[in-house]
Image (cartoon, rainbow, N blue to C red):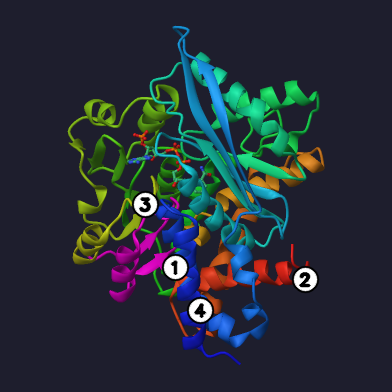
Amino acid sequence: MTTRSETRTALDHLLTEIEHRNPAQPEFHQAAHEVLETLAPVIAARPEYAEPGLIERLVEPERQVIFRVPWQDDQGRVHVNRGFRVEFNSALGPYKGGLRFHPSVNLGVIKFLGFEQIFKNALTGLGIGGGKGGSDFDPHGRSDAEVMRFCQSFMTELYRHIGEHTDVPAGDIGVGGREIGYLFGQYRRITNRWEAGVLTGKGQGWGGSLIRPEATGYGNVLFAAAMLRERGEDLEGQTAVVSGSGNVAIYTIEKLAALGANAVTCSDSSGYVVDEKGIDLDLLKQIKEVERGRVDAYAERRGASARFVPGGRVWDVPADIALPSATQNELDENDAATLIRNGVKAVSEGANMPATPEAVHLLQKAGVAFGPGKAANAGGVAVSALEMAQNHARTSWSAARVEKELTHIMNDIHTTCHETAERYDAPGDYVTGANIAGFERVADAMLAQGVI
Ligand code: NDP
């Protein structure tokens, strides 16, 4: 029987090896540290998990594809971007995870997201493996025609690697309904198949699920509500700070309002807006979803209650709960200290890995309820899996039915994380609970399926 400290030493060695074998991938190293550092208790308690090679297989993607994406802009100039798809783990089902179009995308970023996705998807309890993809293409300022040509070129390579039973991409940063439409069209054209289940986040009327656009934001608010409930509180009357102003942020703000809380901020890479009266969602949707504008336009049009802070951080605004919903490492130790000083009760991650490890540590030490992304933002991928189920059955469910399923799944994830943390002597530690519960499900499937 290995002890916890022997297991910890073995995991430390493995983490050093991961850094050597995957140079210049700091985000992937960070994600691997975050998970592996919490696994010692479960590996020490269950000897089958100490089997040589299990964790080594878990941290090595099953397949990584990198490809050239040439496309022409509206002036006829040729641009060359890089495309990625990392198929990380299919022990539980077809690879599933979004596509990100952002200039910061590189292999390490996609691997961090794909690695997180394995455990997140396992936590949903549904039959989906983990994968992620994207490109260093920047859609900002590009015309619809340019985005279409880029998506078509991207899919002209990607189509070989995906399929409804193989790998099912969805959206992420820079990839919303418009991009999924262009990608799906090109897939259909190349393959000459109506294979609705090959992509999720599709439009309503051609295979999309109701509540999929809302699912990540709604799910995160439901997770935050469950954490508060555990402490005898609820969302009614709470003030919230939300970062980002994309898909996740918008539907986070919407669900907060529906549950009686008030979101007073949103942001993008230019800065943030604080609105004393609470964010006006119709105005924000008009600017972001229709006009594809910047958040300063919100402050200009909203009137006296709102102001724009260029380059600032929403975490400076006092609030009861914080829901980071933009990007990785957007909430650091200083931000965490500010939130704590201002009396924050809960932080729930809508984005993937938005809080740095130091910030997470500080928040947990201060007794703040902290919901890690792989649990708190799993609602998006869960409804994507429900979209796949509807596609297979050639049917579509009502919004009420999908939302009921989503609520059930988020409450289940919360309970699983909470109970697992208690089982491994870490009460209230949702990071440990999420990592161990996700790991157990994937590791059991991997062990049962042999050394592959
Ligand atoms: P969107 O592209 O719709 O919105 C992203 C938002 O974050 C924009 O406001 C964007 O501002 C801001 N942002 C992105 N990168 C940066 C950056 N480097 N610095 C500052 N602001 C930035 O993406 P989503 O809302 O879909 O995704 C947000 C987060 O949620 C990501 O971490 C994603 O991985 C995660 N997530 C998304 C899911 C989904 O279903 N969409 C599911 C689970 C997690 P700007 O326009 O200025 O770049």
Q: In the picture shown, does residue 187 fall above or below 210? A: above
Residue 138 in the magenta stretch? The answer is: no
Residue hosting label 4: 10
Residue hosting label 1: 16
Q: Element at badge 4?
A: helix
Which mark's residue is nearer the viewer, 2 or 4? Answer: 4
Q: Quadrant of the C terminus?
A: bottom right
Residue hosting label 2: 448
Q: Type of residue at label 3?
A: Pro
Q: Quadrant of the N terminus?
A: bottom right
Asked if labels 2 and 1 touch by Cβ distance under 8 angstroms, the answer is no
In what quadrant does ligand 1 lie? top left
Snapshot quadrant of residue 29: bottom left
Decide which of tag 2 and tag 3 comes sooner along the chain: 3
Circle 4 residues within 10 Å: few <14, some 14–19, many ≥20? few
Kindly tell me whether residue 223 is visible in this rendering: no
Residue 368 placement (x, y as % from top left): 33, 70
Distance CA(mark 2)–CA(mark 3): 37 Å
Q: In the picture shown, does residue 52 fall above or below 128? A: below
Asked if labels 4 and 2 touch by Cβ distance under 8 angstroms, the answer is no
User: Which region is colored magenta?
Assistant: 343-372
Who is closer to the viewer here, 401 or 20?
A: 20
Q: Type of residue at label 4?
A: Ala
Q: Type of residue at label 1?
A: Thr
Which mark's residue is nearer the viewer, 3 or 4? Answer: 4
Is the residue at mark 3 in contact range of ligand 1, meaning its CB lies under 8 Å from it? no
Residue visible at 66% across and 39% down in the picture: 209
Decide which of tag 1 and tag 3 comes sooner along the chain: 1
